[in-house]
Image (cartoon, helix red, strand yellow):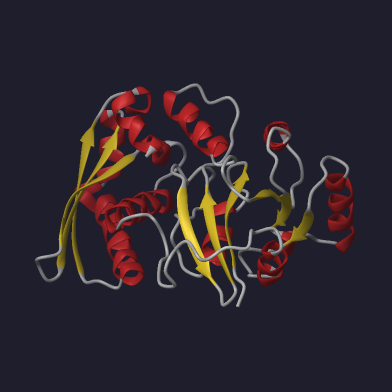
């Protein structure tokens, strides 16, 4: 049987639903999801293997304008680098339409040679079908897309149609990965992302963006697995908020993260979290460099 296989980059502005779509396509949660924008900081590989095709999806940080810190510049660079050496690109917009970020992404797409599928997400939020028609018309005038596919990643609407229409744009090839392969990211990475995701759930305003999580220990020789993590913040005041009164906030974050680890990684886990100070880590090349890996 002839098979197809290729890399597909998913790109868009923050909070367009890239990571939700990525997880739906892969069939399992790999990338962190939050209702707050710019949750994703790394390029993450996820693999979907069907009988006749293997799709290697690349989730990317949201393209954003105006960020002045080194971290902002690195995240944008990571996302734009993903446009090269892939066979297909999904440009994701949501039902809200076009912003400065989307126009910026379009300018970058004119420099690539591979086909681009425009994915219009969150169609379940549209009040009238006419709104979708207007968005389809406007979008088709902006770029020569290979396809335009409306979806709701949250509701799983039209996801299979997107998978099927994408096959023709992948080269004929043997599969790159085994059938069981899911992601290039380690258990340590997934645990760190789940802790950061829990922080996004419980913390308000800008504080989650000022956090950076590192796993210091992942000891599989114990039962349950012993995991030790550090949440780095930039200010002493942030540290106090993150810990909470008598440690209540940190306990809530830890409990949610531990349950997510056990569910997602199918493990029993004991999780300890410390909060430490690292001033201006978002402009520290040694720390930010870890997001280029």
* Front one among 11 and 99: 11
Compared across the picture, whether 234 is left or right of 97 comes to left
Q: Position of residue 34 (x, y in %)?
A: 49, 53
Q: Position of residue 23 (x, y in %)?
A: 51, 62
Work out which quarter of the rendered image holds the C terminus and state it. Answer: top left
* Front one among 98 and 143: 143
Q: Position of residue 203 (x, y in %)?
A: 40, 46
Identify which residue is drawn at 42% across, 69% down. Answer: 178
Compared across the picture, whether 292 is left or right of 98 comes to left
Identify which residue is drawn at 64% across, 58% down. Answer: 171
Quadrant housing residue 233: top left
Where 93 falls versus 50 (above or below)?
above
Compared across the picture, whether 68 is left or right of 279 comes to right
Please identify the residue farthest to the left as the structure is shown. Answer: 222
Q: Position of residue 253 (x, y in %)?
A: 31, 55
Compared across the picture, whether 71 is left or right of 227 comes to right
Quadrant housing residue 108: top right
Work out which quarter of the rendered image holds the N terminus and state it. Answer: bottom right
Identify which residue is drawn at 59% across, 36% down. Answer: 63
Where 59 falls versus 234 (above or below)?
below
Identify which residue is drawn at 31% across, 59% down. Answer: 257
What number of labels is visible? 0
* Front one among 279 and 190: 190
């Amino acid at each position: 049987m002839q098979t197809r296989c290729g890399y597909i980059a998913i790109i868009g502005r923050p909070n367009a639903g890239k990571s939700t779509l990525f997880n739906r396509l892969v069939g399992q949660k790999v990338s962190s999801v939050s209702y707050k924008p710019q949750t994703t900081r790394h390029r993450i590989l996820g693999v979907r293997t069907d009988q006749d095709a293997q799709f290697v999806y690349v989730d990317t940080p949201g393209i954003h304008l105006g960020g002045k810190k080194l971290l902002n510049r690195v995240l944008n660079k990571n996302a734009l680098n993903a446009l090269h050496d892939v066979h297909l690109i999904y440009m994701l917009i949501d039902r809200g339409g076009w912003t400065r970020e989307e126009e910026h992404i379009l300018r970058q797409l004119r420099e690539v040679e591979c086909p681009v599928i425009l994915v219009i997400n969150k169609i379940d939020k549209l009040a009238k079908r006419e709104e979708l028609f207007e968005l389809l018309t406007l979008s088709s005038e902006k770029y020569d897309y290979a396809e335009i596919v409306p979806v709701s990643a949250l509701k799983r609407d039209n996801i299979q149609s997107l998978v099927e229409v994408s096959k023709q744009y992948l080269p004929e090839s043997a599969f790159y990965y085994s059938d069981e392969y899911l992601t290039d990211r380690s258990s340590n990475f997934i645990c760190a992302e789940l802790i950061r995701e829990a922080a996004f759930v419980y913390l308000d305003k800008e504080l989650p963006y000022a956090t950076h999580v590192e796993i210091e220990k992942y000891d599989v020789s114990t039962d349950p697995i012993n995991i030790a993590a550090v949440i780095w913040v930039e200010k002493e005041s942030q540290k106090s908020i993150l810990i909470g009164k008598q440690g209540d906030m940190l306990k809530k974050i830890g409990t949610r993260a531990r349950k997510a680890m056990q569910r997602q990684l199918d493990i029993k886990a004991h999780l300890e979290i410390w909060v430490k100070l690292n001033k201006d880590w978002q402009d520290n090349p040694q720390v930010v460099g870890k997001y280029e890996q």
